[in-house]
Image: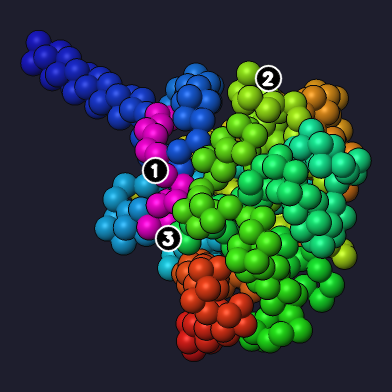
């Protein structure tokens, strides 16, 4: 009986150990996902679908304003606030990677290499630091020139501008005919990350567009540079022809799109996905009247940018289960599910977001969707003329904010365009030391 009791007790202990082990194994991995605020309802729905396919992973969402995102994330990283997977950008990759806040996916998930042939070159460049890939694309896109076709025709023009001189001529005509007081508006609030991408897109549309040499020394701080041509054109538009709305200095993306949709703006330089929003029936008073043109200028070049999903060092350090859960998340959101780029395709179909995953251009649904609000052939053509932002360094993000502040001094008449460029170049050299 003693032996039987001992055997029974031993069996119960063993069973308890097994039950506890199963309970521990069954506990879902908890991931914290940080994003900038955009279509949070879609993000939450995608999370729910991901969790249904992966019941062993639970995701908590935190969102912050795009304009404040880099400051918030820096504080989270420095303060070790729980953050496992996150939106990131080619703006901040160098800084975040150099600080070891996010980790190279190649080091943990060698299977990521199979995705690289599918990605646009500028997107790969924007997600790569020291030869390693740090993300899977949330979306990738180009900065484009958008115009109100109805306003253009009322001003007496049958085709969009080809050069920036054309833009000035057409805008002056609109102003004289009282079609719109300020035909152009930009998102030039000095803290918005879109500012530098818009400016660079205008630079890249000119001949000899590079702003830095191979040693990453500034080459734009002289009167012959493409950057100086752009800066002078902008200052002239603000202060002489007055074709650019002075409210641009306080403008961010969403208010600009709303103003354009209300018929208060004829020309704008914006991320391409805004064209889908502007032409969505019922979304804006002027919906259906907007078209894209190749970026005005000699080369029609522009910026190609990428926003991506990254895994943090905090997640990597939490252990294999968290890393495995993070990869499942990254692949579901930025890679393939069931052989398709499911989430990326959803963003393209429902919101008009661009994509780095080039095979999607062959998808009949994608092509048909783009042609409802845009021109897929022109979009592909502009994509081929796009280039990644040059001289991306760990201090590129902080420098871009300094650049924007100096440019706004020129737009306000406090400095000449050349002085603004020289001041920002001096700041670059100081940061580069």
Front position in the image: 397 or 102:
397
Residue 420 is situated, as x and y percent measured from the top left of the image, at 55, 79
Decide: marks 3, 1 in contact (CB < 8 A)?
A: no
Q: CA distance from mark 3 to mark 1?
A: 18 Å
Residue located at (38% from left, 58% from top): 71
Colour approach in the figure: rainbow
Disc 3 target residue = 101
Residue located at (55% from left, 68% from top): 411
Classed neighbour count for the residue bearing mark 3: other residues with Cα under 10 Å, few (<14), some (14–19), many (≥20): many
Residue 89 is situated, as x and y percent measured from the top left of the image, at 56, 54
Residue located at (63% from left, 24% from top): 285
Decide: marks 1, 2 in contact (CB < 8 A)?
A: no
Q: How many marks?
A: 3
Which label lies toward us, 3 or 1? 1
Residue located at (71% from left, 39% from top): 179
Disc 2 target residue = 281
Specify the label residue 64 is tagged with: 1
Classed neighbour count for the residue bearing mark 1: other residues with Cα under 10 Å, few (<14), some (14–19), many (≥20): some
Q: Is residue 120 magenta?
A: no
Task: Tell which circle, 3 or 2, labels the residue nearer the N-terminal end.
Answer: 3
Classed neighbour count for the residue bearing mark 2: other residues with Cα under 10 Å, few (<14), some (14–19), many (≥20): few
Residue 210: quarter of image: bottom right
């Amino acid at each position: 009986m003693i032996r039987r009791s001992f055997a029974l007790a031993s069996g119960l202990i063993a069973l308890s150990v097994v039950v506890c082990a199963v309970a521990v194994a069954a506990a879902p991995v908890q991931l914290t996902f940080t994003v900038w605020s955009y279509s949070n309802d879609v993000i939450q729905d995608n999370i729910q679908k991901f969790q249904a396919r992966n019941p062993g992973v639970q995701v908590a969402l935190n969102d912050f304003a795009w304009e404040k995102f880099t400051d918030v994330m820096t504080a989270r990283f420095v303060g070790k606030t729980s953050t496992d997977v996150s939106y990131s950008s080619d703006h901040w990759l160098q800084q975040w990677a150099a600080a070891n806040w996010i980790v190279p996916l190649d080091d943990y998930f060698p299977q990521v290499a199979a995705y690289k042939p599918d990605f646009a070159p500028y997107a790969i460049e924007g997600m790569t630091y020291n030869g390693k890939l740090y993300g899977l694309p949330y979306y990738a896109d180009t900065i484009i020139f958008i115009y109100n076709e109805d306003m253009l025709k009322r001003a007496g023009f049958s085709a969009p501008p080809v050069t920036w001189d054309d833009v000035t001529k057409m805008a002056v005509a609109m102003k004289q005919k009282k079609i719109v007081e300020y035909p152009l508006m930009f998102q030039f609030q000095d803290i918005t990350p879109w500012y530098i991408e818009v400016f660079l897109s205008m630079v890249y549309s000119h001949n000899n567009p590079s702003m830095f040499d191979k040693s990453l020394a500034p080459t734009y701080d002289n009167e012959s540079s493409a950057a100086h041509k752009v800066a002078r054109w902008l200052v002239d538009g603000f202060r002489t022809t007055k074709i650019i709305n002075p409210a641009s200095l306080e403008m961010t993306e969403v208010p600009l799109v709303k103003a354009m949709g209300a018929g208060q703006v004829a020309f704008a330089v914006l991320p391409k996905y805004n064209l889908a929003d502007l032409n969505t029936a019922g979304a804006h008073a002027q919906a259906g009247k907007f078209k894209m043109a190749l970026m005005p200028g000699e080369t029609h070049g522009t910026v190609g940018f990428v926003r991506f999903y990254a895994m943090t060092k905090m997640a990597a350090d939490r252990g294999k289960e968290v890393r495995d859960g993070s990869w499942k998340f990254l692949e579901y959101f930025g890679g393939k599910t069931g052989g398709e780029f499911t989430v990326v395709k959803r963003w393209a179909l429902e919101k008009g977001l661009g994509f780095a995953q080039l095979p999607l251009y062959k998808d009949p649904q994608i092509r048909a969707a783009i042609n409802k609000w845009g021109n897929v052939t022109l979009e592909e053509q502009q994509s081929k003329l796009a280039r990644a932002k040059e001289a991306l360094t760990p201090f590129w993000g902080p420098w871009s904010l300094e650049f924007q502040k100096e440019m706004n001094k020129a737009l306000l008449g406090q400095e000449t365009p050349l002085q603004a460029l020289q001041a920002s170049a001096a700041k670059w050299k100081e940061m580069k030391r």
